[in-house]
C-alpha cells in the first residue's frame, strides 16, 4: 500500500483516550507541531475504546495509530511500537510524583512518612497491572504487598500505627494509578488507616489536594503530562518528588506498520 492510502485507511484520525487526560492535551498540541499532521484529527473516546479499536485493527491487520503510554499491558499483549517524536510533543521520560496536601505532615505524621518513603519501579507497577487483568486490583495489590515485604517495610519504617484514622487517596482512572493506589491502600490499612480511593480527572485531582478535599495522590505524571496543572497548583500542594521513573507517552502503532516516526504519518 502507498503511504497516502494508509492515511486514507486511517481516515487521518488518531484514536485517542479520555478528553480530560494529559495524553489527550499533549496530542492535541502535537497536531499543531507537525506539518504532516495538518489534516489529521484526534478522536477522543476512552482508554477502553482505544484498546478495543487497537485490538480490532490488529485482528484485521489494518493500519491504526493511537495515543498510548507505558507502562501499559497492551505492550505485553500486542506487538507494538512507539513512534519517534522528534519534536517531543508527547514529552520524553515521565516521572510519577507523590503529592500531599499542606499540613499532612503535622496532622498524619505516619501516613506522611509512608508517602515520603514510597517509591517503586516500573516492573513492580506492571506486575500489579498485569495480574489485575485476571483478578481484582485489591487482590493483585494484596499479593504484591505479600511478595514484596522488604520494600513495603522500607516505606513504613518510622511510621507509627494509628487507630482507624481516615486517609483520602485521590487517584486518576487509569490502570497504572489503580495499581499504585491499591497497593498504598493496603499498606496504609495495615498501619491502621481507613483508606478511601477516589478516581477523578487529573485537574480535579490537583484541586482536591490543593483544597484539602484529599490527603495525597500518587498519580501526577510530570514534567509534561500534568505540567500545566502542576504549574497552576504548585503553591497549594506539597510535592514529595517522584515515586516512579521510566513512564512515557507516545503515538503507538502495530509493529507491522511501515512507519517509525510521527513524521512518517502521511499528510
Ligand atoms: N495517562 C496515564 C494519564 C496519566 C496516566 C498517561 C493516560 C493521562 O494522560 O492523564
Image: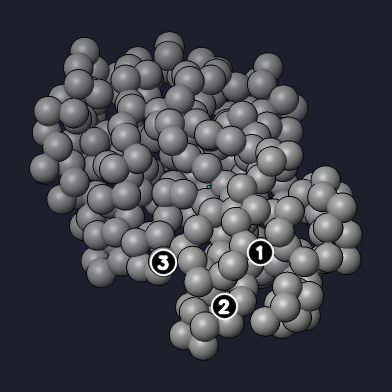
- Image-quadrant location for residue 266: bottom right
Where is residue 1 shown, x and y percent of the image? 67, 82
At mark 2, the secondary structure is helix
Distance between mark 1 and mark 3 Cα atoms: 19 Å
Mark 2 to mark 1 CA distance (whole Å): 10 Å
Q: Is mark 2 within 8 Å of ligand 1?
A: no
Q: Secondary structure at mark 3?
A: loop
The answer to which of marks 1 and 3 sits earlier in the sequence is 1
| Picture quadrant of residue 227 | top right
The answer to the question of whether label 1 and label 3 lie on touching residues, with beta carbons closer than 8 A, is: no
Relative to 3, residue 36 above or below: above
Of tags 1 and 3, the one toward the viewer is: 3
Q: Is residue 260 left or right of residue 87?
A: left
Relative height, residue 206 to residue 37 (above, below): above
Residue identifier under label 1 = 16
Q: Secondary structure at mark 1?
A: loop
Q: Which mark is residue 153?
A: none
The residue carrying pointer 3 sits among few (fewer than 14), some (14 to 19) or many (20 or more) residues within 10 Å by Cα, namely: few
Q: Are marks 2 and 1 in contact (CB under 8 Å)?
A: no
Residue that label 2 marks:
53
Q: Position of residue 254 (x, y in %)?
A: 51, 68
Amino acid at each position: 500500500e502507498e503511504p497516502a492510502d494508509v492515511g486514507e485507511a486511517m481516515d487521518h484520525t488518531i484514536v485517542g483516550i479520555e478528553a480530560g487526560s494529559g495524553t489527550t492535551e499533549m496530542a492535541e498540541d502535537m497536531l499543531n507541531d507537525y506539518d504532516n499532521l495538518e489534516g489529521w484529527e484526534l478522536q477522543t473516546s476512552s482508554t477502553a475504546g482505544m484498546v478495543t479499536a487497537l485490538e480490532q485493527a490488529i485482528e484485521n491487520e489494518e493500519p491504526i495509530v493511537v495515543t498510548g503510554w507505558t507502562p501499559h499491558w497492551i505492550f505485553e499483549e500486542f506487538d507494538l511500537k512507539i513512534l519517534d517524536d522528534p519534536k517531543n510533543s508527547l514529552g520524553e521520560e515521565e516521572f510519577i510524583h507523590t503529592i500531599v496536601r499542606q499540613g499532612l505532615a503535622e496532622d498524619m505524621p505516619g501516613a506522611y512518612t509512608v508517602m515520603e518513603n514510597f517509591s517503586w519501579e516500573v516492573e513492580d507497577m506492571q506486575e500489579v497491572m498485569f495480574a489485575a487483568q485476571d483478578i481484582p486490583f485489591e487482590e493483585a495489590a494484596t499479593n504484591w504487598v505479600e511478595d514484596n515485604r522488604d520494600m513495603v517495610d522500607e516505606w513504613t519504617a518510622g511510621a507509627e500505627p494509628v487507630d482507624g484514622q481516615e486517609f483520602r487517596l485521590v487517584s486518576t482512572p487509569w490502570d497504572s494509578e489503580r495499581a499504585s493506589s491499591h497497593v498504598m491502600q493496603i499498606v496504609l490499612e495495615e498501619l491502621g488507616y481507613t483508606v478511601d480511593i477516589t478516581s477523578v480527572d487529573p485537574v480535579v485531582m490537583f484541586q482536591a489536594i490543593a483544597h484539602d478535599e484529599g490527603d495525597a495522590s500518587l498519580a501526577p505524571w510530570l514534567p509534561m503530562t500534568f505540567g500545566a496543572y502542576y504549574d497552576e497548583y504548585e503553591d497549594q500542594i506539597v510535592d514529595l518528588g517522584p515515586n516512579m521513573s521510566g513512564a512515557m507517552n507516545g503515538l503507538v502503532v502495530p509493529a507491522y506498520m511501515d512507519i517509525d516516526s510521527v513524521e512518517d504519518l502521511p499528510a
